[in-house]
Amino acid sequence: MAYDPRPVEPSIYKRWLEAGVFQPRPDAEPYVIVIPPPNVTDVLHVGHALNNTIQDVLIRFERMRGRAAEWLPGTDHAGIATQNVVEKRLKAEGKTRFDLGREAFVQRVWEFVNRTGSTIIEQLKQIGCSCDWTRTRFTLDPEYSRAVREVFVRLWEQELIYRGHRVIHWCPNCLTALSDEEAEHHETNGNLYHIRYPLSDGTGYVTVATTRPETMLGDTAIAVNPEDPRARAYIGRKARLPIVGSEIPIIADEVVDKEFGTGFVKVTPAHDANDFEIGKRHNLEMPLVMTEDGKMSGDRVPADLQGVDRFEARKRIMKRLEQEGLVDKVEQHRHSVRRCYRCDTVVEPRLSDQWFVKMKPLAEPVLAKFRAGEYQIVPERWRATYDQWMENIRDWNISRQIWWGHRIPVFTCGKCRHVWADRTDPDQCPRCAGPAATIEQDPDVLDTWFSSWLWPFATFGWPDETPDLKRFYPGHTLVTAPEILFFWVARMLMSGYHFMDKRLPFTTVYLHGTVRDTKHRKMSKSLGNGIDPLDVVKLFGADALRWTLIAGSSLGADVILDPNDLETTFAPGRNFANKLWNIGQFVLGQLKGEVQTLESVDRRSFTLADRWILSRAQAVIREVTASLEQFRLDEAAKRCFEFAWNELADWYVEAVKPRFEATELPAPSEARGEDGQTARAVLAYCFDTVLRLLHPVVPFITEEMWQKLPGRKTAELLAVAQWPAPRPELEDPRADQEFGRVKIAIEHIRSIRAEYRVTPKTRLKATIVPRGNDKAATFNGEADTIVRLANLESLDIVDNLDHIAAGAAHAVFGDGSEVVVALEGLVDVKQECRRLSEEYERLEKQLTSLAARLTNQSFVSRAPQEVVAKEREKEKAWRDQRDVLAGKLKSLGCS
RNA sequence: GGGCGAAUAGCUCAGCGGUUCAGAGCGCCUGCCUUACACGCAGGAUGUCGGGGGUUCGAAUCCCUCUUCGCCCACCA
């Protein structure tokens, strides 16, 4: 029967919720993760699924380890993004936000958010996220907004906020300023236009190179490098600005690169950040020649270009310059163009007044702490990037010319022009007591990130000293994608340090990869190459989705998924869940409702197989725990897989079957005396253990199976069960080795069977001859296992083979131990000779290279003792194997 | 222009403080409906570990270099 996750997952999730297990347990040491709040408008995509599954694995792991696990969920109001969504809807009605007016528009956004804002929260539940939903926050909650305002005012009081008049990145589509981080670089094929500016004295012209000819209307100078011999003679002279007709000076400035273009740079102070700096140094005029939505405008713009879009204007201006013979040449030019991270519109540098945060004082101590190792980034390779950004941090433009967000709490008195920041809306001017009616608030809102950078403490009630804040700040692990390292992570570290008494909000930043398609393109809605995680949940279950995301991505690496073949992509997870379910069916069938514990059985009744699997279980506990502690979630998942499937199911369960009465298989004499209690206890222990270890990765199926284990009290949930601790007394290296030999013997017999194409219906007779370290007792104890798993009729274990049976196949292993399978009539001497001599030659070759190493003086003297000893042991075993093989070949009469 | 990462079986990836390390899953081939599981069982095949140099007793694994793809940062207009 196949496992069907569909009815299971929702009901299990409901049980967790009802039991309240996602809320941190009292009186335990907290472990805190704050979610990277998705935008309220978001619907779950596979990137969210990856991000949140990782967090869920970590939080579930720590919860089972007994910590008071707090995973704080919530959403971000996402100023520009959300406003854009609602504006798009308005547009469909033929309206703009200006038609509605500010108040009505904001109202409209709220309605939208109230209606759809919990979509992604509900979706996170479907993939199993164990967030503490009782503490869900939204960045525009009244309490949260209070924190934002408090932070603004404090920074104001500390003189870390200032009004800056400078060229910033402006999105002509979103109609707002952007921060440096929000204007993304995109390599673009463009042109470099070489334009002639005639000299005023009529003695010729100078040629400037530009990628944005339309900005020439705003030129107020031409700059050259003072060191440039070509240009030096022109300094101080004047040129006539084409089309506009005004006269502009040729000035000298260090920033001009002698090597680039013509060496002459047009200077447009109002539309280029560099040129603005030049303009300031040289006291140039700074005329704006475009409107906020990117249309040409202003005194200097000729009538036929007024209101023309910047890119159309570019064409028209070039045409006109062409006609006037002022175009020197147009070169193809690959360069980087900044685009709005929200709408992809080419950003226009624009001179304006904005609010800025001085970042250097905030960054410095936090960078110092980083360098001192007080918090870490994994994987480490992001260290340099982070360090460099922090080192060269620039002031942060926090004002946005939109309406959806936290209004900037800066007020201006109409009477006395006093400007101040206020925690509450003022009744009167604090300086001249001017009436409220004359006081104006700044019309802009704050950058979304100016609220989310407070997430680790504003969510817990700051600025009040709440019990939550005391308990859950500082937190521990922050899991996110590298894309928002600067937007969010770095700023959280700074705000945490600055406002929370120099205490950083977390100790580890875990940066995971990006989910991409098979062409390595980022999955996105616009490309249509996405995978809807909820489709996957419907088809294969949340566990399968989680399995693929966790087991399929090593630390920090991108995850490549094929959106065109969900079956192949998610089958491993589905298959594994099914396997677990079936192991469970078997285990439950054997336990018959009885509780079996290791304590209730006599250790002396352990068989070799028992000792082996118990020892393997200790190894898996240690390894999985260590992997999770090191954030190697993939390793942890795969190790559990190996244990459950290859060790427990393929070997232990198969080995142990005859010990159960229910089985119809013939029980050999050795097993008959035992009533199977021991095997049941071992089975129960191992299955219980692997369910616990796997629970963080595949919580649904493990909880479902765990609930079915005998003796479960109704209120008990795996989600809050104890993480397994290794039991040293069950570690058994000897059993590992001995059972390993039994496995090898079985595998050899199986190989022989396959090689000689013996159908499974035919039971074979086999003999094992143990030699060297392999003792007869090892094989005797598991003789039954060998008989069954190798599908034998009988097995002899003898000290010596005095004669060679005709028609037998041989295999040599270990220290020269042998397996001999009787195959009368099926095997001819020739084939056996070929088989054995191939093996012989393989060994001989290995021995030769090994011998070369061991006789090499520098190897013996320079390599570590251990390595040499190991090699010697290996050599001995191989030599024994080879000698046995040689004897075989000889007695078979092989040439 | 800087910085970082990746290149290992047909596909997606592990392995990267050096000596059974050439692996996993999927796919493929050969047998099996062996009563927990055909979403399964057993047995197989497949790779000059991107190219070239170097260090070393020994290198997917360390160093240099080249090639090809990504990513991040950047005031060459």
Image (cartoon, rainbow, N blue to C red):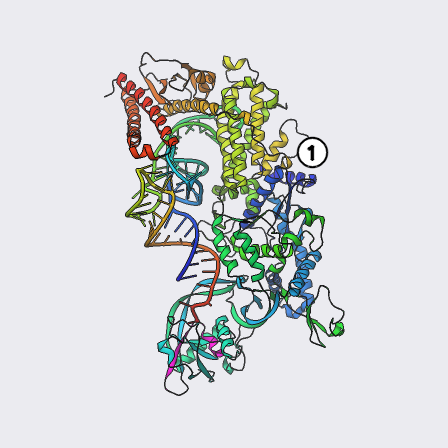
Disc 1 crowd rating (10 Å Cα; few below 14, some 14-19, many 20+) is few
Q: Is residue A343 left or right of residue A520?
A: right
In the rendered image, is residue A40 in sight?
Answer: no
Q: Quadrant of the N terminus of chain A?
A: top right
Q: Is residue A821 magenta?
A: no
The mark total stands at 1
Q: Position of residue A380 (x, y in %)?
A: 49, 49
Residue in the image at 65% along x and 35% along y: A717
Q: Quadrant of residue A451?
A: bottom right
- Left or right placement of residue A831 versus residue A360 in this view: left
Compared to residue A613, the image places residue A783 above or below, namely: above
Q: Is residue A356 above or below residue A13?
A: below
Q: Which residue is mark 1?
A: A715
Which residues are drawn in magenta?
A203-219
Residue A465 in percent (x, y) is at 71, 52
Res. A711 visible in picture: yes
**x%, y% of residue A220?**
48, 80
Disc 1 residue type (three-letter): Ala
Task: Residue at the far front: name it.
Answer: A861
Q: Chain of mark 1?
A: A
Residue A881 picture quarter: top left
On screen, A526 above or below A626?
A: below
